[in-house]
Amino acid sequence: MPNIKSAKKRVRIAAERTALNRVYKTKYRSLIRKMEEEPGADNLSQAMSAIDKAAKKGILHKNNAARKKARLAKLLKASAQ
């Protein structure tokens, strides 16, 4: 456990950010799973929106987000045929 005041604050802030990051990560993962189980335009837009938000917050790298979105779009296209 840290003794210095600033170190205590950094521990507290890290815990808060970890909790927030977990929320965004869980959200986009669950929406991706929903899209994979039931492909549809509505599920696709929700998943892409969640992925974009995670990338904007720095939880996902922008290229990683782009790859996930491309794979979901590909999945939707394959299910339509």
Image (tube, rainbow, N blue to C red):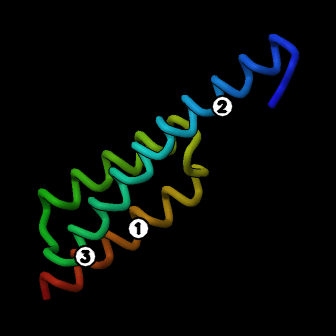
> In the image, 11: left or right of 44?
right
Q: Mark 3 points at which residue?
A: 36
Q: Distance between the residues labelled 3 and 1?
A: 13 Å
> In the image, 16: left or right of 12?
left
- The percent coordinates of residue 66 (x first, y second) are 49, 58
Q: Name the residue under label 1.
A: 70
Which amino acid, mark 1? Ala
- Residue shown at the point (12%, 82%) measured from the top left: 80
The residue nearer to you, when weighing 81 against 56, is 56
Disc nearest the viewer among 2 and 1: 2
At label 2, counting other C-alpha atoms closer than 10 Å, the crowd grade (few under 14, some 14-19, many 20 or more) is few
At label 3, counting other C-alpha atoms closer than 10 Å, the crowd grade (few under 14, some 14-19, many 20 or more) is some
Label located before the other in sequence (3 or 1): 3
Which amino acid, mark 3? Glu
Q: Mark 2 points at which residue?
A: 14
Label located before the other in sequence (2 or 1): 2
Disc nearest the viewer among 2 and 3: 2
Q: What element carries label 1?
A: helix
The residue nearer to you, when weighing 62 against 22, is 22
Q: Are marks 2 and 3 in contact (CB under 8 Å)?
A: no
- The percent coordinates of residue 22 (x first, y second) are 47, 46
The residue nearer to you, when weighing 53 against 27, is 27
- Residue shown at the point (27%, 59%) measured from the top left: 31
Q: Is mark 3 on a helix, strand or loop?
A: helix
- The percent coordinates of residue 58 (x first, y second) are 58, 40
Label located before the other in sequence (2 or 3): 2
